[in-house]
Image (spheres, grey):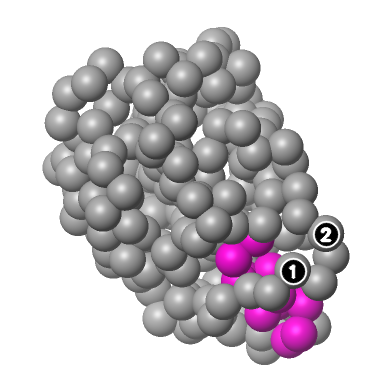
Amino acid sequence: MKRMPILALIAALCLTACGAPAGEPAATPVASVSTAPAAGPYRGLQLETPLARPSFTLTDEAGQPYDFLARTQGKPTLLFFGYTSCPDICPTTMADVAVAIRGLPADLAETVQVVFVTTDPTTDTGPVLTEFLDHFDSDLPNGFVGLTGTIPEVEAAQRAARVTVAQDMGKSHSAQLQLYGTDDLARVVYVGGSSPDDILHDLPLVSRG
């Protein structure tokens, strides 16, 4: 697990305004992350209290209901909330995830689920999500899943996942990428300063039965 200065860590876990000027006000982070020296095997940021895989149902790119818990249960899963027109954090995070998965052994890569939930459901329809995610997952064994819904449904999903609910029409959103293991717990998350190598290192650890 990385150690980050406490103020930098708090800022990283707060709402991020994509492309906004420095000094943008932020909300209080939801997940509690240890800032002590590494006490576990992870390179991401280790949670003091693991988060249970959340239960929520949204709409996938094909317009069909997608039960997150039922569809991903028992599988290594990366969950991120953002929006497709984000100029920086969202595409960078998806690109980092894709790079990490490409570095995995084929049998493990085939099990990894990646779910991107829009925080701007008014704009991010199914076709828009598909076009965005196709930039990252076209050569991967499992395509990334894009989810949308009504604003109340998307906000409920964020609360279920224990991330700060997006503000400013979804433009100020959590920068937290959560990794759930085969035990259906998230013990580690990634924020600013994490790299594809960190994700690549941690995926096999959470994929052990």
Q: Secondary structure at mark 1?
A: loop
Which residue is label 1 attached to? 24
Residue 55 in the image, given as x and y percentages of width and height: 19, 55
Q: Residues within 10 Å of mark 2 (few under 14, many from 20)?
A: few
Q: Would you identify the image quadrant in which residue 24 lies?
A: bottom right
Residue 163 in the image, given as x and y percentages of width and height: 44, 66
Range covered by the magenta-colored residues: 6-16
- Please state which of residues 120 and 133 is positioned toward the viewer in this rendering: 120
Q: Residues within 10 Å of mark 1 (few under 14, many from 20)?
A: few
Residue 161 in the image, given as x and y percentages of width and height: 34, 62
Q: Main secondary structure of the magenta part?
A: helix
Q: In the picture provided, is 114 more to the left or to the right than 90?
A: left
Q: Does the rendering let one see residue 162?
A: yes
Look at 45% across and 31% down and name the residue there. Answer: 123
Q: Would you identify the image quadrant in which residue 141 lies?
A: top left
User: Between marks 1 and 2, how big is the CA–CA gap?
Assistant: 6 Å
